[in-house]
Amino acid sequence: MADLHLPGTLTPLFPGLPRRLDIEAATVGGAIEELERRWPGLFDRLCEPGPSLRTHIHVYVDRERASLATPLEARSRVDVIAAISGG
């Protein structure tokens, strides 16, 4: 199982969603699909139609920038980061 870490900005929007969870998936996209099964609506917060990651969402697998197609190993660490901008 991959060790998935989510940004704190998502947890208030989805009751019961933890910031860290173990998830069984072959790819980053598969992990997001599993999150969608458990917390409907989460996919749209992370992905655009196509699908592709939203421009303000960055995903890292074992400290390397990732895409939806990036494979996950049994002990991969997946960090989902929501970029914040301001002016």
Image (cartoon, helix red, strand yellow):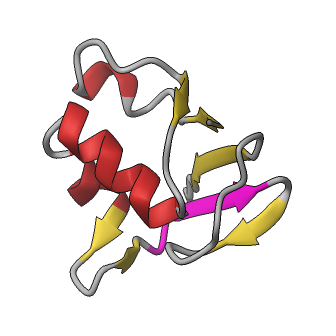
Residue 34 % position (x, y): 32, 45
The residue located at (43%, 32%) in the rendering is 9
The residue shown at (72%, 53%) is 73
Principal secondary structure, stretch drawn in magenta: strand
Q: Residue furthest right?
A: 63
Q: Which residues are drawn in magenta? A: 55-61
In the image, residue 28 above or below residue 16: below
- Which residue is the extreme one toward the bottom? 50
Residue at position x 64%, y 68% in the image: 71
Q: How many marks?
A: 0
Q: Residue furthest top?
A: 16
Q: Position of residue 4 (x, y in %)?
A: 60, 36
Q: Quadrant of the C terminus?
A: bottom right
Percent of width and height locating residue 67: 58, 75
Q: Nearer the viewer, residue 30 or 45?
A: 30
Residue 13 placement, left or right of 85: left
Q: Nearer the viewer, residue 52 or 33?
A: 33
Specify whether 8 is left or right of 45: right
Q: Quadrant of the N terminus?
A: top right
As for residue 84 lying within the magenta part, the answer is no
User: What residue is drawn where x is 54% and y is 64%?
Assistant: 27
Based on the picture, tell me whether residue 60 belongs to the magenta stretch. Answer: yes
**Residue 56 position within the rendered picture, expressed as x and y whole percent measured from the top left:** 49, 65
Residue 38, by quadrant, is top left
- Quadrant for residue 18, please give it: top left
In the rendered view, would you say 73 is above or below 6? Answer: below
